[in-house]
Image: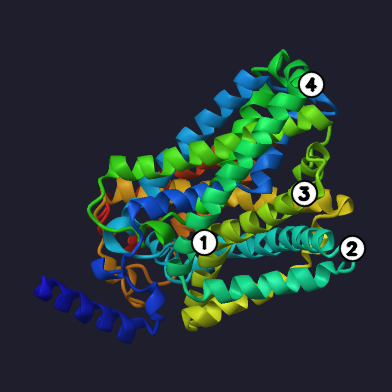
Amino acid sequence: MSTANESFDAKETQIEHATGLDKSLHPNSEKDRTVKPRDYIFMWMGDGVNIGNMTLGASVIIAGVATLNIFQTMLAALISIGIISTIFALNDRLGYKTGIPYVVQLRMSFGTKGTVISSLLRGIPAIVWYGIQSWIGGTALNEFLKIITNGSFNNIVICFVGLQLFQIVISLFGFHAIKWVETVASIIFMIGLIYVFGILVTSYGTEITQTWVQAEGSWGIHFFALIMVFLGNYAGIFVSAADYSRELKTGISDKKRGALYFVPITISYGFVIVIGAMLASATGVTNPAIALPMVIDNPYISAGVSLFIVITVIATNMVANVVPPAYVITLLTKLKYKISVTITGLLALCAFPWLLIQESSAAGLNMFVLIYSAFLGPVISILLVEYYILRKQRVDTGELYNEKGSYAGYNPAGLLAMFIGAAAAFVEVELAWIIGVVVAGIAYYLLSKYAFKGSSFKKGTIFEK
């Protein structure tokens, strides 16, 4: 074992001298991995329970009419979760086996310079959502403080800034802090969800049954569109699966890791979607942050719900919106990880989230989501085609860190396939994600085989001469 560790340390020193990258972007060794399977389960449960996912469930109710009934909604959710878990388990394998982060994995398909473009497509949306989630959390924190102070305190800006500074401090401790936050949050989440579910069943059962359960629904575009929305909602997370799997303890089989995604996401994501649909059916309001207080007519419990929302915001940000953009900043600037985490939090403060969540900004925000999701589908497709088909799961990790090696510069096949896939995705908006995945994957394979002869990116692939 000592020989293996010495070899790894020597390789790490070589990587640092060759690239100047911060240690946070170096491959994680076995001793660096502190996340146990139990911690991993809690992490994804914590990420799955948030107001955004609840809003997706509420979206099946439009103007008091259900576009999907309970069976169609749950089937769409299960299909989505099955696909999400499968892609997670496939895309996390390189990070799990080698310990490299997502931004280094990208070099395999896009090149050391081309990675700048593809990494920003993950980093920028995460920062924007970091700010949006924090503003929602700051608003909920303000409601909590208003209730416990009998209205003497009322300042959303102070709550927003204070919550953001608190999250920055927590994120400085890396995955050690994330494990703790997600474990505590998951327990609170499930207690809160079970409580809300009980109220909805006992007090609004008739309304929910008439509006949602017994609705005719549709097996057409609404059904498939909901699946695409679910997948798009997780597109930014499973594309950077390596950022999470590299922290997971070694010795876990591919099937067991797949279960580590499927079980917690089903429990949390599935439960939240159902409650979102039930809330919208019971109140006629599709915004869960407004609907929740309507069904809980008790100031003390309302205070608890507001605090619950604050905790969900912190948990979601810690998993989805802090680590990936921090790695991007570290890669592009070669700053230390803790400095990059701080910059990520400060940039989220400057994202003007209070403007983005207004009704007048809804169309612009939806367009923003549509644009980056249209690119993330092709990116995940290209990475999977590269690793499983072109390279047969054989990747020289050291070469990924070689700034002058075979991955230097831009890979025109990867960048061109990404833009082709994104362009195709906009042809049919409701099915954008799956169209982008299929088109980009095929385009990348064909371009890698027939175009750009002599490209160094063919080295180590099935197309190497």
- The correct choice, above or below, for 449 with respect to 354 in the image is above
C-alpha distance separating marks 1 and 3: 22 Å
Q: Residues within 10 Å of mark 1 (few under 14, many from 20)?
A: many
Pointer 1 or 3: first along the chain: 1
Between marks 4 and 3 in the image, the one whose residue lies nearer the viewer: 3
Query: Label for residue 120?
Result: none
Q: CA distance from mark 4 to mark 3?
A: 22 Å
What's under tag 2, amino acid-wise?
Answer: Gly
When the figure is inspected, residue 312 is found, relative to residue 80, above or below; the finding is below
**At 37% from the left edge and 61% from the top edge, which residue is drawn?**
108
Judging from the image, the colouring scheme is rainbow
Circle 4: element type: helix
**Which one is nearer the viewer's eye here, 38 or 287?**
38
In the image, which is nearer the foreground, mark 1 or mark 3?
A: 3
The amino acid sitting under disc 3 is: Ser
- Residue 75 in the figure: left or right of residue 459: right
Labels 1 and 2: the sequence-earlier one = 2
Q: Which residue is mark 3?
A: 302
* The quadrant where residue 20 appears: bottom left
Mark 4 near mark 1, Cβ–Cβ under 8 Å?
no
- 374 or 456: nearer the viewer: 374
Measured from the top left, where is residue 162 in percent x and y? 71, 74
Give residue 181's mark: 1
Q: Which mark is residue 207?
A: 4
Instruction: Return the residue at label 2.
Output: 151
Label 3: state its secondary structure.
Answer: helix
Q: Position of residue 368 (x, y in %)?
A: 72, 54
x, y (%) of residue 50?
63, 48
Residue at image location 79% in from the left, 64% down from the top: 145
Report whether 419 appears left or right of 60.
left
